[in-house]
Amino acid sequence: MTDEIQHLIDIHDRASANEYLRRRDERRRRLIASRMLQLGERDHKYIKQITLCRIEEIEGLKAYLTMEQVMHELGLSEMSLKKYIRQCGLTVYNRMIPRYAIELAKDSVYGILMQKEYQDKKLKTQTQEEYLLEIEERIAEYGKCF
């Protein structure tokens, strides 16, 4: 958020205003491409048509990051990342997370949307036994901390 404020402060003429808007538009297009990938869209040309992102950029969003890279990008500890994964349903493959999920998680609106969708899906499919097991796991996890 402080970067955003600094960028707004740095606007002092038309050129700097245009540059600010260009960067902001690029971020929004990248978020839309990330969302399309999250929803399962596989056609990179279609995503490019919608978002105007380059194919290489779209392929870069599909790259996987290690847990350490994710912790660094999101500024989280390992414990906080595990909690975030559990609450938002971030997809983890072999202890790696796709970049598009991290891009969405960094944005407050998409982060909340991801969490809501995951919680809604979880409530529909979770059995009572799974729910109790999850509570027991959380209690054990907090027991380790204290």
Image (tube, rainbow, N blue to C red):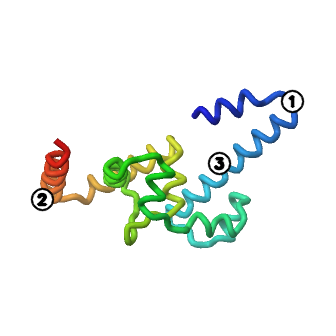
The x and y percentages for residue 18 are 82, 39
The numbered mark, 2 or 1, whose residue comes first in the sequence reads: 1
Mark 2 near mark 1, Cβ–Cβ under 8 Å?
Answer: no
The quadrant the N terminus occupies is top right
**In-image side of 42 versus 68 (left or right):** right
Above-or-below relation of 90 to 55: above
Image quadrant in which you'd find residue 145? top left
Mark 3 burial class by Cα count in 10 Å: few <14, some 14-19, many 20+: some
Residue at the image point whose x is 87% and y is 37% from the top: 15
* Visible residue check, residue 76: yes
| Point 56% across, 61% down: residue | 36
User: Which amino acid type is shown beneath numbered disc 2?
Assistant: Glu
Residue 76 placed where, x, y %? 41, 47
What residue is shown with label 1? 13
Separation of marks 2 and 1 at Cα, in angstroms: 61 Å
Marks 1 and 3, how far apart in space? 23 Å
Q: Is residue 58 above or below residue 134?
A: below
Tell me which residue sits at (34%, 47%) in the image: 80
At label 3, the amino acid type is Arg
Q: Which residue is mark 3?
A: 28
Look at the numbered disc 2 and give the secondary structure of its residue: helix
Residue located farthest toward the right when viewing the structure as drawn: 14
